[in-house]
Structure formats: C-alpha cells, structure tokens
Image (cartoon, rainbow, N blue to C red):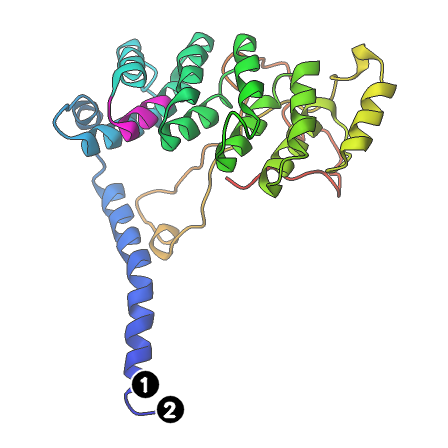
C-alpha cells in the first residue's frame, strides 16, 4: 500500500462515519435536555418558522398529552389549511396518532394533494384510523391510474387490510398484478390479515379460494389488524445511554377498532413459516 494510501483510507472511513456520530450526539443531547412540553407547543404554533413547526408537531405526535382537544384543533387546522407540505404532513401524522374516527375524512382528502409527501403521510395515517366510510377512497386510489407513486400504493394496500369486505378484497387482488413487488407484498400481507389465508402472490389461487368459500366465512380470521410501527437499530451512544432507554411504539389496533377483548396479532397462534411479511417501513 503506498505511504499516502493509509491516511487517505482512514480519512474516508471517518467521513463515512461522520453522519452516524453526529446523529448519535444529537440524539444524546436531546436525551439529556429534551424540549419541554411548553417549548414543543410553542414551536408547533410558530408561523414564522416551518422547521420548528414541524419539529413541534412531531414532538406532540409522540407525546401522551398530544391528544388534548386544543392540540387536536391545531392539527386539523394545519391538515386543512397549511401551505407548507411538510408542516401539513407532520399534522396528518399527529392527527392520525391522537384523533378520532371522524378525522379519517380530512386525512383521506389529502390523498388528492399534488405533494407526494402529503399523500404518503395520509396513506400511512389511514392505517391508524378505522373508518368504513373512507374504505372506498382507499381502494379507489390503489391503482396506477389514480396514484403513480408505488411507495404510496404500498401504504394504501397496508391500510386496506383492516376493511374486511368484498370490495377491499378485490382491490387487493388487483394490486397483486401491479408491476412493483413492494405493492404486491403489501397486498399479500393485507389479504392474509383479512382472511387468515396464505396463497402468496398467486392471484388465481386467491380467487379460487374466494369462489369456493361461503360468504360468511371469508373474512373471519383469528388475527387482528394492527398498524405497523417504525424501529431502527440503536447507535453506539444509544446502547450505552445512562439517562434512560428508548422505548419503541408497539403495533396496536387502529382508532375505531379498540376492543380490549380481542386477541392481538400472533397471540395464541403457532408461527407459520410461509406467513407473508409486511412491506418494509
């Protein structure tokens, strides 16, 4: 190795690690001195700084007190009236975490937004709210003609899994024929959640099962629909954090489907080797 190559290689390695180190130190700083609830609320209503608005809304979305009525009114105003697409997206996320089944209507309207980030936030948000009257909006958007972004169609297919109906089933079957594998896999996962059956990506096998199954027995699986949550690997400083451990949000029943007597996904069931995996978050 030439004499100058080793220092150059070391420099490249350090530069590559720079983002991770910076992220870890930023995370550690936020753990030592996180924003107060008052600061988060102040940022969320700051009309002069969209960046702080987004951060404030994100903090409220993850806070236990983020569902207070005053905050819900704020989210709804931003969802319907904000001109900043990232502020609007953050408000959609917050509302989907803390809102009511009726809030699905204003979130579903944003599936017509010209901004892809807003549509993506809406599709993800609708996975957390059960509202039968927006089912048609979801499955009608789950076509290439209505939504050209496959990432959004993945999220729409995942949202449709909670609606156990013939229309939702047929829309998911059609999604198996779309050209993107991510959409196919998301549709397969929702079909499994909806029916308890596992026929992979074989459209003909699904339709054969459907035609052979009595109407009342089609959508009675033992598995509940739980919205998916995001998790990431811990960085070095997160693993040795002396100030407390990070607790990830766990998958749960959507708003409008809460029923403490129902069994959660996987509980009491033997694992199935060929069980379809959900699309990556």
Q: Position of residue 95 (x, y in %)?
A: 37, 18
Q: Point out the residue furthest to the front here.
A: 145
Tell me where the magenta segment starts and ends, as one range. 83-92
Q: Residue at x 75, y 42 (%)?
A: 274
Q: Residue at x 31, y 14 (%)?
A: 80
User: Considering only vertical position in the picture, is 149 above or below 254?
Assistant: below
The quarter of the displayed image where residue 67 is located: top left
The quarter of the displayed image where residue 225 is located: top right
Instruction: Say whether marks 1 and 2 touch (CB < 8 Å).
Output: yes
Residue 229 visible in the current orientation: yes
Q: In this view, does 29 lie to the left or right of 214?
A: left
Q: Which residue is drawn at 30% across and 69% down?
A: 14
Q: Can residue 231 be found in the magenta stretch?
A: no
Q: In this view, does 168 lie to the left or right of 232?
A: right
Q: Distance between the residues labelled 1 and 2?
A: 6 Å
Q: In the rendered structure, find residue 5 and report the number of the disc placed on it.
A: 1
User: Considering only vertical position in the picture, is 19 above or below 79?
Assistant: below
Q: What element carries label 1?
A: helix
Question: Disc 2 marks which residue?
Answer: 1
* Total numbered labels: 2
Q: Point out the residue furthest to the bottom here.
A: 2
Q: Position of residue 13 (x, y in %)?
A: 33, 71
Q: Is residue 168 left or right of residue 31?
A: right
């Amino acid at each position: 190795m030439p004499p100058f190559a080793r220092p150059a290689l070391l420099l490249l390695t350090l530069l590559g690690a720079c983002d991770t180190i910076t992220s870890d130190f930023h995370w550690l700083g936020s753990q030592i001195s996180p924003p107060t609830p008052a600061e988060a609320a102040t940022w969320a209503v700051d009309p002069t700084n969209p960046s702080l608005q987004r951060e404030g809304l994100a903090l409220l979305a993850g806070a236990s007190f983020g569902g207070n009525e005053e905050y819900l009114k704020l989210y709804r105003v931003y969802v319907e009236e904000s001109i900043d697409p990232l502020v609007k997206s953050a408000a959609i996320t917050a509302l989907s975490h803390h809102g009511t089944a009726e809030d699905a209507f204003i979130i579903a309207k944003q599936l017509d937004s010209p901004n892809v980030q807003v549509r993506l936030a809406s599709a993800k948000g609708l996975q957390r709210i059960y509202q039968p009257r927006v089912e048609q909006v979801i499955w009608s958007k789950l076509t290439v003609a209505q939504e050209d972004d496959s990432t959004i169609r993945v999220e729409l297919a995942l949202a449709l899994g909670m609606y156990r109906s013939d229309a939702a089933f047929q829309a998911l079957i059609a999604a198996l024929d779309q050209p993107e594998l991510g959409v196919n896999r998301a549709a397969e996962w929702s079909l499994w959640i909806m029916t308890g059956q596992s026929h992979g990506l074989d459209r003909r096998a699904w339709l054969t099962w459907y035609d052979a199954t009595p109407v009342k027995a089609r959508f009675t699986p033992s598995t509940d629909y739980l919205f998916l949550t995001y998790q990431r690997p811990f960085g070095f400083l997160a693993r040795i954090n002396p100030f407390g451990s990070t607790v990830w949000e766990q998958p749960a029943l959507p708003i409008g489907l809460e029923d403490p007597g129902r069994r959660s996904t996987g509980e009491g069931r033997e694992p199935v080797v060929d069980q379809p995996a959900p699309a990556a978050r």
